[in-house]
Structures are given as structure tokens and as C-alpha cells.
Amino acid sequence: MKAYNYDVVVIGGGPSGLAAATKLAEKGYKVSLIERKDELGGILDQCIHDGFGTKLFNKALSGPEFASFFINKAESLGIDIHLNTYVKNVEIKENEKEIVAISPQGVKNIKTKAIVYAVGCRERHQFEIKIGGTRPAGVYTAGMVQRLINLYGILPGKNILIVGGGDVGMIVARHLYLEGAENLLIVFPEKRFAGLPRNVQQCVLDFGIPYRPQTVVKEIIGKERVEGAILVRVDERWKPIPGTEELYPCDTIILSVGLIPYSLKLKKIGAKIDPKTKGPEINEFFETTIEGVFAVGNLVQIFDYVDDAVESALIAANGVEKYLNQEPKEKTVEFVPGKYIRALIPHRIEWKDDRNIIAFFRVNTEKENAYIELRDENGNLLKRYFRRYIRPSTLERIEIPRELIQDKRQVTLNVSED
């Protein structure tokens, strides 16, 4: 067993992990980056469409272009990169963390003062959304289809049903159209697409790809290979409407039905998990409920833009610095989601600092000319934020002046009724 010792270990070599590792290396720390695959970049390696980096670089890059910036930076900074390495176990001790990892070179024992988890998320599968029927060949997740098309040049089918109206589903639909799919149909239970408006326009409407709102797959038909699907209309509560069943012939079904933070490893070592985001509870510097263990990117919550996921990593790097410098924490200010707020991070404010607090949240309603209110434990209004339009599909970001809340016990964010 080979032994290693670092100031910080970053687990996950996607964009968030790369951003955290490079930022910490620039601060002068001895950093290691662990990635279970044989290459860095994460999901961006298969995202050949543009739109990445509009906030960070002020230009639209493809996924590989965006990732290559941080990969080149990591290599130039001399970060110790462990590829093809799987983290088997993490043990939290009083003054250090011990990682046992497996690689082709053998078992590695890695000691570190701080850990940054950046392991991303996973896709939901057919049994998590209660689709009945058999298990024939031809049922894929959207991420797998992206990989087949963009990395291996394989078109999975010709007559394709796409389940889900989110961003990934729309982007995959466009790829399939451009690669020669003969028949495409997108179905989703909502009244309208759940993704970003720009993707609705650029991926679906511009190419005339047909879609059916308020429609779900009741059953998959086929023995060896997909032969079709039973579609059914649903009401506003997503309950099937009797008598609306219809057989839709197809040879391929692609599931784009949501992403879930891959937080199982954090839960295993004792971190608290938010049932709303499915990610770990964090403070304003993305530290989990375990001191010295941080989480960033889609592991915390699903970000709409990679730029925002990277921002979470850069904020966490500042938190790691404060932890390694043993800066004391102040009293905890609880950050609570109020009316119409579906999910909110951070969950608490703990450290003394002069920088604004960055908060991300999703709402559970649609509203025009909306006011987002920040109130203390007594209901006093601290600050209001105006949004022209809010919707559940869009992750919102606000900056909160720290001096507004540093002497409070609890702060609530809600959508005003006005």
C-alpha cells in the first residue's frame, strides 16, 4: 500500500473539482485530484454543443473547450492527479482525513487535512419514475445517448421517443435530429418545457421537433427490442386521464427525467443530506456538517449552468483556506426556505468574513414581476430582490450583504405575495 500526504484532496475531476483544485493550488497548498475515469473533464467531455463559459469567460465554449482550460491549468500547477482511481473508504479523524483508494497501481493510502467532494450527480432510471412494461434493448438515459453519439459516433435508433422536457432532453433531441433520426417525439408531464427558454428555442422550436406536453409513458412495449410505448395524457397533478391511452411505435426510448446528486458517499461518513436538494447540507463556504469536508457542483444541487457550478467550487476553495488557517467560526445563522421556495443553499451561515453571501434557490411557482424577500426571525424585512419572471425550472442566484444577517439567529427567504 503506497502512502500519500496532502493539504487538500479533491475527489472528482469534472469542472467543479478541477476549479477547486486549481484555485487551492494557486493559494499554495499541496493538492491532489482523484478521478475514477481515465481522463479529466467529467460530463463536459461528451457535451460538444456550445453555451459553456458565458459567465466565466464571456464567450460560448463547447464542453471540451471549457474543461480543457482547467485541465491545462491543473497540469501547469503541478497538481498530483490520480486517474483510474476509486475511493473505497474515507475515515474522518480528529486532525486529519484518511482515504483508501484503489487503482491499477494498487491500493493507495492518502492522508489529508481537508477534502472537497466534487462527484457530481446521476440520472434517474425508468423504475424511479414508475414506467411499467418489460426491459427490452433500446431504453437509454439521455447522458448515455450523448456519449454514444458524441464520443463513439453511434446513433442508437431511428424512431425515437424522448421522455422529459428538461435541458438535457432538448439538447439530445437536437443532436438526434442532426445525426439523422427519422422520427422524434418529446413527451413530458408539465404544461411547458422544464428547461431554459434558450434551449426550447434553439433545440426544439428552431428544428420543428414535435412534442406533447402533459403526456407520460405508461408502459414500454417490446420483448427483445423496444417496439413502442403506451402514452397517456395527465392532468395538472400528473394523474393519468382515463381513456387517453395511445400506442406510439418507436424503436428507442430515451429517458431525460432528472438528475440526482450523488451524495451516498457523504451520507455514509455522516454528512447530513437535504431531502429537497438530495445533496449535503452546507454552510456559506460549501462546507458540509463534517468539519473540513466540503462539497461542490452538482453534488450539492443541480446547477443550470456550469459557470455557477464552478463558482461554488471557487467559493469552497476560500472556505478550505479558512479551515486550514483554523479561522474560528461565529454563531450559526440558520438559512430557511420560506413560502414558494422549493430548495435553498446554503443552509447556514457560520464564518466571519467580509464577502457577500452567494445563495442559490428554486421556486415552486411561476410568477411575473416577483419580489424575493429576506426576513429575520421576527419577520423584519432585510432586503428585497426583483425578478421579472420566476419559474421552477430556473435556478436563481442572489448576493446577500453579510452585515445584514450576521447578528441574526435565523433568516428566511420567500416569494412575496405582492
Image: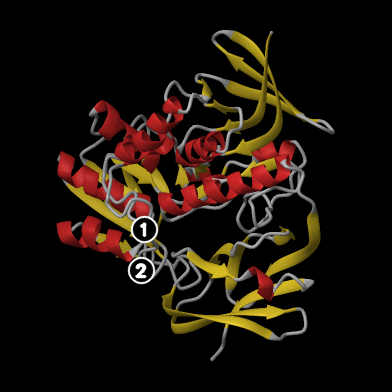
Q: Which residue is mark 1?
A: 165
Find numbered disc 2 in the image and state the secondary structure of the residue it sits on: loop
| Residue closer to the observer: 101 or 113 | 113
Percent x, y of residue 20: 54, 40
Q: Is residue 327 left or right of residue 364?
A: right
Q: Which residue appears farthest toward the bottom when viewing the image? A: 418
Percent x, y of residue 35: 52, 26
Residue 163 appears in the rendering = no
Quadrant showing the N terminus: top right
How many angstroms separate mark 2 from mark 1 (CA)? 8 Å
| Contact flag, marks 2 and 1 (Cβ < 8 Å) | yes
Percent x, y of residue 17: 52, 37
Q: Is residue 290 left or right of residue 224?
A: right
Residue at position x 26%, y 34% in the image: 149
What amino acid is at disc 1? Gly
Identify whether 163 is placed above or below 91: below
What amino acid is at disc 2? Arg
Q: Is residue 335 left or right of residue 363?
A: right
**For residue 97, which numbered disc appears in the image?**
none
Q: Is residue 286 left or right of residue 211?
A: right
Disc 1 crowd, CA 10 A, few/some/many (<14, 14-19, 20+): many
Residue at position x 76%, y 66% in the image: 333
Q: Which residue is mark 2?
A: 192
Identify whether 250 is placed above or below 329: above
Q: Which residue appears farthest toward the front when viewing the image? A: 28
| Residue closer to the observer: 3 or 90 | 3
